[in-house]
Image (cartoon, rainbow, N blue to C red):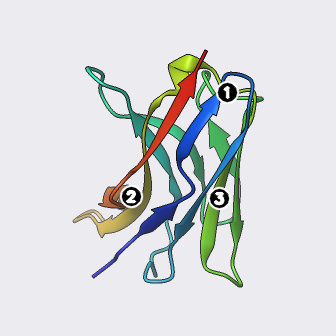
Amino acid sequence: QVHLVESGGGAVQAGGSLKLSCDVSRYTGNCAMGWHRQAPGKERELVASISSVGIPTYSDATKGRFTISQDNAKNTIYLQMASLRTEDTAVYYCAAERREALANGFSVCYWEYWGQGTQVTVSS
């Protein structure tokens, strides 16, 4: 069973920085890993992802401020968050995709594995 464990959340003032970590040692898939977040009263949204070959992708809201990275030796992915805003306040979830084979011979990846979430609170 894939078990993802986040750490590094907390409270920070606007303009500050935080770094989240996620232990992905139990993930053996070959799809993307990433970070989602969910603010109160809002749907969960993808913040940043990194493909199986290390290509990062960011949402428009976080591009230029957040950086996703991975350390294969430590089986860990990170989310470095800078220039934090109050609207970044949310529970942040580490996630990994699962690959599923299709009947036509192709396959698809979808977000299947989730961490327990870590709270990030940005105050003004």
Do residues under tags 3 and 1 come within 8 Å of each other at their CB atoms? no
Mark 3 / mark 2, whichever is N-terminal? 3
Quadrant of the drawing holding the N terminus: bottom left
Q: Residue furthest left?
A: 103
Name the residue at 63% across, 34% down.
Answer: 12
- Quarter holding the C terminus is top right
Q: Is residue 105 visible?
A: no
Residue at coordinates 62% horizontally, 64% vertically from top-left?
Answer: 77
In this rendered view, identify the residue nearer to me: 105 or 31. Answer: 31
Q: Which residue is mark 2?
A: 109
Q: Is residue 114 left or right of residue 35?
A: left
Choose top left, top right, bottom left or bottom right for residue 72.
bottom right
Q: Where residue 23 sits: x, y (%)?
A: 52, 73
Q: Give, as a three-letter code, the residue at label 3.
A: Tyr
Q: Quadrant of residue 111?
A: bottom left
The answer to which quarter of the image holds residue 59 is: top right
Q: Which mark is residue 124?
A: none
Left/right placement of residue 93 relative to residue 11 reads: left
Observer-nearest of 8 and 116: 8
Mark-to-mark CA distance, 3 and 2? 21 Å
Q: Secondary structure at mark 1?
A: loop
Q: Which residue is mark 3?
A: 78
Mark toward the viewer: 2 or 1: 1
Instruction: Name the residue carrying label 1.
Output: 84
Give x and y (percent) for residue 2. Answer: 33, 77
* Mark 2 element type: strand
Please provide percent x and percent y for residue 47.
53, 37
Mark 3 vs mark 1: which is more N-terminal? 3
Question: What's the distance in space between the residues labelled 2 and 1, CA to CA?
Answer: 30 Å
For mark 3, does the 10 Å Cα neighbourhood hold few (<14), some (14 to 19), or many (20 or more) residues? many
Residue 10 pos. (x, y %): 54, 45
